[in-house]
Amino acid sequence: MIKILPILLVLCSLNSFAQSYAEQIAKHRENYKQDFIKESYSPLKEKDLKNLNFYDADSTYKIEAKVEILKNEKIFKMPTYDGTSKEFSRYARVAFNLNGKDYQLTLYKSIALANNPLYKDLLFLPFTDETNNKETYGGGRYIDLKMSDIKNETIEIDFNKAYNPYCAYSGGYRCPVPPEENDLQIQILAGEKLYTGEKKH
């Protein structure tokens, strides 16, 4: 009995962590849905929210990545799905291990938002993966991060918080196309899935 007790305590602790993490992601997603209702330029109304779909929360996809800040990067034009472009600069390269394999992604900084005091800390992580056009939006997904999230040359990236660009729901938006360097040769079975409602025009 004495030997079994510590094992039971560990199992209970792990179960508690899993529940609290799932609750944390559920709260994040509820806030995400409410933002559609609050924002005047949102492509979705309250009645559309039932058509938003997500993978179950999975802490496997919450990873610690090593950060390399990039220096002297030039501003470039990132294409958008409406045929225009937006100005960004490469801010950092992140390296991480997922399911036993090593991957890299690039974090970007929006030039337009960098001049806005509310968003100057914001980092943009667009990516594509092998779920696109199958279980997730074909145009890739996004994750929002902050420069202040970088601590001791590491940053937490939670793919459970990956979301669809507005272009997944409606035409008429300038959604950046994830650069080729951010194409992951793996299925990211986390975050937002395909929208099942009718796409607006």
Image (spheres, grey):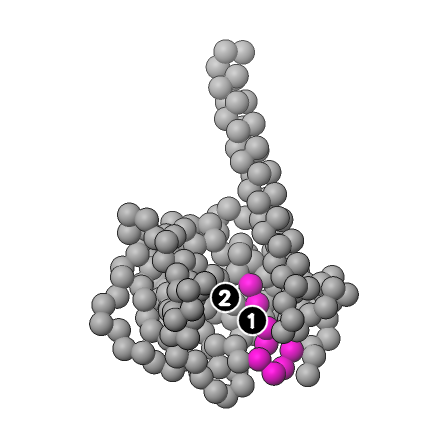
User: Hey, which residue is sitting farthest front in the picture?
Assistant: 117
Part of the protein shown in magenta: 163-173
**Quadrant of res 189:** bottom right
Residue at image coords 38%, 52%: 149
Three-letter amino acid code at the position of disc 2: Tyr
Residue 72 screen position, x and y as percent:
22, 72
Q: Is residue 186 found inside the magenta-colored segment of the image?
A: no
How many numbered marks, from 0 up? 2
Q: Mark 2 points at which residue?
A: 142
Q: In which quarter of the image is the C terminus?
A: bottom right
Q: Distance between the residues labelled 2 and 1?
A: 7 Å
User: Hey, which residue is sitting farthest right in the picture?
Assistant: 47
Q: Mark 1 points at which residue?
A: 165
**Of helix, strand and loop, which one carries label 2?**
strand
Instruction: Tell me which secondary structure the magenta stretch mostly adopts.
Output: loop
Drawn side of residue 33 relative to residue 123, left or right: right
Circles 2 and 1, Cβ within 8 Å, touching? The answer is yes
For label 1, the crowd category at 10 Å Cα-Cα, with few meaning under 14, some 14 to 19 and many 20 or more, is many
Residue at image coords 43%, 80%: 86
Q: In this view, does 14 lie above or below 50?
A: above
Residue 51 screen position, x and y as percent:
72, 65
Note whether residue 30 is visible.
yes
Q: Is residue 167 found inside the magenta-colored segment of the image?
A: yes
Q: Is residue 89 above or below residue 21?
A: below
Residue 165 screen position, x and y as percent:
56, 71
Residue at image coords 59%, 61%: 192
